[in-house]
Image (tube, rainbow, N blue to C red):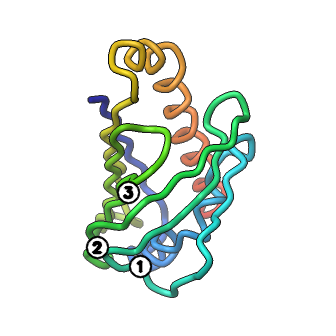
């Protein structure tokens, strides 16, 4: 199992942060363009809820398109939500999005646990490629959020 935790404070209120992050449509704007992120779910909901299924096409490595299905498993508005992969490139994906009121804004914390398929070979692939790519994705997100919200 692999782990990543990131934190960022933005000068916006917790409700504004919740509105932005709880909308799957906004995910594309904070995902690197090279990932070819595209939501394929045939519907759009105004409000995130436990049990919500979101389908995507992403190109995580070498530009190869991969279908990814996530489920929103936990929601406590406006404090946190959890998405878990149901089908996709990982054998396990559990991503917590947490929001805390902070001086001058909102502190966002992402906690990611993931596991690569293929056992020992997957661990090598993670060390050589995947871990680095995931860190680049979250760094891109940090920069884009700073651009969007100051």
Q: Disc 2 marks which residue? A: 75
Residue 29 in the image: state x and y as whole percent.
67, 60
Relative to 52, is 135 above or below? above
Q: Are marks 1 and 2 in contact (CB under 8 Å)?
A: yes
Nearest to viewer (mark 3 / mark 1): 1
Say whether residue 46 is left or right of residue 2: right
Residue 36 in view in this figure: yes
Residue 112 in the image: state x and y as whole percent.
34, 43
Which sits in the foreground, 12 or 31?
A: 31
Q: Residue at x 54, y 47 (%)?
A: 142
Q: Secondary structure at mark 1?
A: loop
Badge number at residue 48: 1
Residue 5 in the image: state x and y as whole percent.
33, 40
Q: Residue at x 44, y 15 (%)?
A: 127
**Number of marks in the rendered image:** 3
Who comes first in sequence, dot 3 or dot 1?
Answer: 1
Q: CA distance from mark 1 to mark 2?
A: 8 Å
Badge number at residue 121: none
Badge number at residue 108: 3
Q: Residue at x 59, y 53 (%)?
A: 146
Q: Which picture quadrant has residue 41?
A: bottom right
Nearest to viewer (mark 2 / mark 3): 2
Q: CA distance from mark 3 to mark 1?
A: 18 Å
Q: Residue at x 37, y 17 (%)?
A: 123
Q: Quadrant of the N terminus?
A: top left
Q: Are marks 3 and 1 in contact (CB under 8 Å)?
A: no
Q: Secondary structure at mark 3?
A: strand
Q: CA distance from mark 2 to mark 3?
A: 15 Å
């Amino acid at each position: 199992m692999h782990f990543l935790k990131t934190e960022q404070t933005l000068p916006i209120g917790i409700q504004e942060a919740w509105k932005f992050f709880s909308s799957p449509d906004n995910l594309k704007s904070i995902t690197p363009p090279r990932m070819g992120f595209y939501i394929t779910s045939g519907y759009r909901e105004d409000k995130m809820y436990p049990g919500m299924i979101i389908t995507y096409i992403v190109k995580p490595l070498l530009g190869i398109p991969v279908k990814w299905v996530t489920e929103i498993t936990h929601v406590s508005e406006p404090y946190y939500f959890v998405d878990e992969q149901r089908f996709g490139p990982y054998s396990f994906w559990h991503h917590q999005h947490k929001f805390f009121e902070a001086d001058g804004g909102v502190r966002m914390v992402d906690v990611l646990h993931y596991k690569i398929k293929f056992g020992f070979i997957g661990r090598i692939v993670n060390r050589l490629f995947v871990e680095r790519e995931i860190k680049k994705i979250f760094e891109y997100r940090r920069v884009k959020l700073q651009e969007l919200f100051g």
